[in-house]
Image: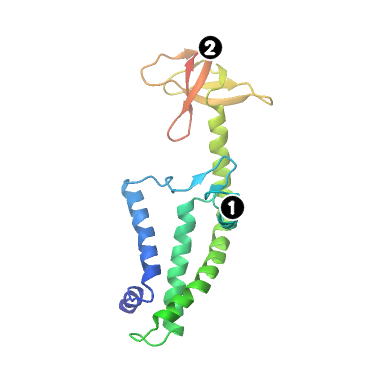
Amino acid sequence: MHELFQEAFSIHNLPVTVLLGLVLGYWLLVVIGFIDADDSGIDINGDGHADFGDHHSAEGGFWLSAGKFLHLGVVPFMIVVSVLALLMFLFSVLANYYFNGQPGARSATVALLWLIPNFLVSVIITRIVITPVKKLFASFQDRIEAETKVIGKEGLVASMQVDRTYGQVEITTDGAPLLLNARVSEGHDAIPKGTSVIVFDISEDHSHYLIRPL
C-alpha cells in the first residue's frame, strides 16, 4: 500500500492522480449534499445528446462524436468521467511501474508519452464498462419523460375520492386511458369521484401525482 501511494503521488503519475482526486472530491460533495449529482456542467439537449458547443464546427463535431461513443446524454456525464479517471489512474501507475525505469528514476517524458495510449485505451474500456448500464439509464430517462408529459393533463377522479393517503385518476390519451395514483396537497380537501381535475406535480419519490380540481 505504501508503494502504491508513493507511485500515485510521484511526478510522473501526478496528472491522473489529481484527476482522480477531483472526481472523488466531487462524489464526496454529492454524498454530503453540497452539490447536486445532476449538475454535470453539460447541457443535455431534448434529443438526448450532450451539447458540447457549436455542432457545425469541426471541433463541435468531434466532441459530439466522442459524446455519442461514450453514451453521454444517456449515461450521466460524471459517471463516464469517473470510470475514465479511475482507468487512466490504474493504467498510468501500472505502465510507469513496469515500463518506465526504476522507482526514483522514472522519466517524466516517457510518462507523458504513456498518457496518449493510456487515454485511448481507457476511453475504449470506459465504453465497454458503461454499455451494459446504458439501457438502465435510458429506461429511467424514458420514465421521467413520460411522467413529465402527464403533468398539466386533465382527467377524472376514478376512485371513490382522492385524499392525502389514497386515490386514482383517469387521464384520457390517444390510446388507452391512463390510471394514475394521485393525492391532494397537504391542507386541501378530498376530491370526490367523477370530479374533473388537473395533474400539476409529481411526488418527490415519483410514487404518485398531485392533483387539484379544475
Crowding at mark 2 (Cα within 10 Å: few <14, some 14-19, many 20+): some
- Residue plotted at (53% across, 62% down): 126
Quadrant in which the N terminus is drawn: bottom left
Q: Position of residue 54 (x, y in %)?
A: 55, 48
Name the front one of labels 2 and 1: 1
Q: Which amino acid does the dot numbered 2 rest on?
A: Thr
Crowd rating for badge 1 (residues with CA inside 10 Å; few <14, some 14–19, many 20+): few
Compared with residue 65, is residue 38 higher up or lower down, i.e. above or below?
above
Q: Nearer the viewer, residue 129 or 115?
A: 115
Q: Determine whether, in the image, residue 5 is placed left or right of residue 116.
A: left
Task: Please provide percent x and percent y for residue 71.
Answer: 57, 54
The residue pinned by badge 2 equals 195
Q: Position of residue 92 (x, y in %)?
A: 44, 74
Quick one: SS at disc 2?
A: loop
| Horizontal side, residue 99 vs residue 121: left or right | left
The label on residue 149 is none
Q: Which amino acid, by three-letter code, is at mark 1?
A: Ser
Q: For the view shown, which residue lies furthest in the front direction?
A: 57
Q: Is residue 99 above or below residue 135?
A: below
The numbered mark, 2 or 1, whose residue comes first in the sequence reads 1
Q: Residue at x 59, y 22 (%)?
A: 171
Q: Residue at x 50, y 68 (%)?
A: 119
**Observer-nearest of 138 and 159:** 138
Residue 157 seen from this side: no
> Label 1: which residue?
57
Asked whether 35 or 163 is in front, the reply is 35
User: Could you tell me which secondary element the residue under label 1 belongs to?
Assistant: loop
Say which residue appears at 42% left-offset and 45% top-offset.
Answer: 39
